[in-house]
Image: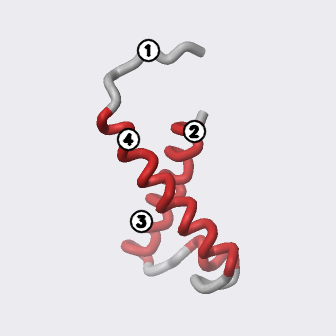
Amino acid sequence: MWNKIALTLLIIGGINWGLIGIFQFDLVAFLFGGMGSVISRIVYTLVAASAIWCISLLFKENELVRE
């Protein structure tokens, strides 16, 4: 479950960085009142924590996922 949450947050962060790189538009800042707003900073921090969490996925062996 944590892996899926982390990957979802990384996808959001990746899309946001793509928008910044291509259009110079920060969607998170736009939605939550600027880069310095508390909510924006929380989102940025969660994306960073997700990236750190996902580093561990690089070192895991392939496992079968049971649904």
Q: Amino acid at mark 2?
A: Trp
- Secondary structure of residue under mark 1: loop
Q: Position of residue 13 (x, y in %)?
A: 49, 60
**Residue under the image location 49 percent in, 17 percent down:** 65
Q: Which residue is labeled 2 in the image?
A: 2
Question: Does label 3 or label 1 sit earlier along the sequence?
Answer: 3
Please identify the quadrant where the N terminus is shown: top right
Question: Does label 3 or label 2 sit earlier along the sequence?
Answer: 2
Q: Which residue is labeled 4 in the image?
A: 56
**Inter-mark Cα distance, 2 to 1:** 16 Å
**1 sits left or right of 25 in the view:** right
**Inter-mark Cα distance, 3 to 2:** 24 Å
- Secondary structure of residue under mark 2: helix
Q: Amino acid at mark 4?
A: Ser
Question: Does label 4 or label 3 sit earlier along the sequence?
Answer: 3
Question: Does label 1 or label 4 sit earlier along the sequence?
Answer: 4
> Splitting the image into 4 quarters, where does residue 28 fall?
bottom right
Q: Nearer the viewer, mark 3 or mark 1?
A: 1
Q: Which residue is labeled 1 in the image?
A: 64
Q: Amino acid at mark 3?
A: Gly
**Inter-mark Cα distance, 1 to 4:** 17 Å
**Residue under the image location 36 percent in, 46 percent down:** 55
**Residue under the image location 44 percent in, 80 percent down:** 24
**Inter-mark Cα distance, 4 to 3:** 24 Å
Foreground pick, 14 / 63: 63
Q: Which residue is labeled 3 in the image?
A: 18
